Image: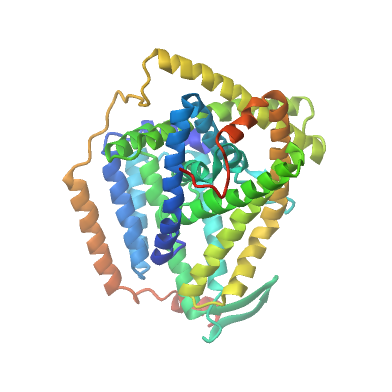
Amino acid sequence: MEGYLDPIWCLVWFIVMIPFFYAGIVKLRQVLRDHPDQKMMVALSGAFIFLISSLKLPSVTGSSAHPTGTGIAVVFYGVGVCAVLSTIVLIFQALLIAHGGFTTLGANCVSMGIIGPLVGLVFWKILRKANVGVFVSMAVAAALADLITYVITAIQMALNVFTTNNANFVDAFVDFMSVYAVTQIPLAIIEGLILGMFAQYLVTARPDLFEIAESNNVNPFAKEA
Amino acid sequence: MSEQLEMDELAYSSRMVDWAPLGKLFFVLCLLIVGLLTNSILVPLITFSVGIALMAYSTNMRIPLILSLAIAEAIVIMIIGSGMISIMGDTDDPALWEGQLLWFNVHMTDASFQKAWLIFFRAIAGVTLMLSFASSTPIPHLAHAVRSIKCPVEICELIVLIYRYSFLLLERFLIMLDAAQCRLGYNGAMTAVKSYGGAMAGTFIFSMELAEKSEAALACRNYQGYFPIYRMPSPMSWKWIAVGLGLSVLLYLIGTETADWIDMTALFAPVLGW
């Protein structure tokens, strides 16, 4: 939310975000130059993140919360492009549905667009290398991307409280994490299952789409450019 | 997601739609940043009033119900977040309230209580300022504006394409969800998950095919990565910079002078017995 982070933390998270965002632009240019036909697919992946992250799913507590929906984009295009798409989506969310904000954009992008998807991508690659099926691989990747997003958000919030209120960091992290856990753990499982089903249907109907990931050389540890 | 549709309609019918998008963005960012830089509650209250006034002028105070609900939902999140911050005080400081609430160790101090209120007011002010901007600036205008400040063309193009495709996806997705409901697709947890997964895959594939067709259609119309705007908003002038910076400096000075004016602990003391 706008105003939650102190200026110093707004700046720190923006600085953390910038290299990934820059790498994403470079990678995006490379993808669009090598495969101009994929422009619409990239935009659609971004719109898909927006649709999924704006979707309110009921959790077991009876409340509702938001999935992140970055699993598909990161598998197709890698972390850098996912960071760019997430940033655009986060701006839309801030403007159109009053979620997030401009001053917290860096922090939100780091959690939802970079670290969460990076962990999801690593698990996707590991599981696919181990010949695990598309459903399970995508389910695990999407669920972890969602969960890690909120772990990072809890760390960001705890760091902010630690520096502004002089609160105990570990206690603050546990408190924030316990609030998120109530909705996000069931939600991450539901998101994992749904995106697993989604990937399974997609691989059956359009197997060519998953070749995009291979042709884009998506490797979380490789240089983006 | 219907908030998005409402906001789009609101932006195109706004009285501020012809104002410079970059100017409005600069103005809003200036007020957001100055709100963060000062520790006075008065500054977020002033920026909140500015945001409300701009929203009232922009929309003629006809805010759709769905947007009001979105704002209400945001306020609930702010209350929970600020409440969390208020109970995480420095354990070395004397507590206003100490104990156990659910599974939380509560240590509310004067400083953490004041900080929580400050953050709450900053958040409220931020939402009204952002909505005043959003309710008067259609996304294609924003994309055009960021293009004019040399933002990479790929990003500007993606902003417009993602925005357009999100409508496409939303429309198709809602149809698919209705279709799933018609054939008892939400009968049981696993069936519901399968229905959502199927609807998403169907939406994605259908939209992809439509996007491929629209790409061909755009190419036929000599699309070069830019969607023309037929009713161009004004360009940003130096007046926006002067007003934005001037107001920021003024608010900063007000903030430094009035940092201790509003004591929320003292205000709540009679009610809460501190």
Q: Would you identify the image quadrant in which residue A191 lies?
A: top right
Is residue B183 visible in the rendered structure shown here? Answer: yes
Extreme residue in the top direction: B220
Residue A39 location, x and y as percent? Answer: 48, 28
| Residue B176 location, quadrant | top right
| Residue A82: % across, % down | 52, 43
x%, y% of residue B274? 53, 83
Coordinates of residue B197 in the picture (x, y in percent): 71, 34
Against A137, residue A115 (above or below) is below
Number of disc labels: 0
B270 relative to B218, above or below: below
Task: Please give the name of the residue rendered at 26% of the width and 59% of the height, measured from the top-left corner.
Answer: B248
Say whether residue B42 is left or right of residue B83: left
Residue A213 versus residue B144: which sits nearer the camera? Answer: A213
The answer, for residue B166, to whether it is visible in the render is: no
Task: Classify residue A98 as left or right of residue A55.
Answer: left
Q: Residue at x 59, y 31 (%)?
A: A212
- Residue A175 as seen in the image, left or right of residue B215: right
Indicate how the structure is coloured in the image: rainbow
Query: Dividing the picture into quarters, in which one does residue B47 lie?
Result: bottom left
- The correct choice, above or below, for B166 with respect to A115 in the image is above
In this rendering, position of residue B41 left or right of residue B271? left
> Where does the C terminus of chain A fall, quadrant-wise?
top left
Residue drawn at point x = 36 percent, y = 23 percent? B224
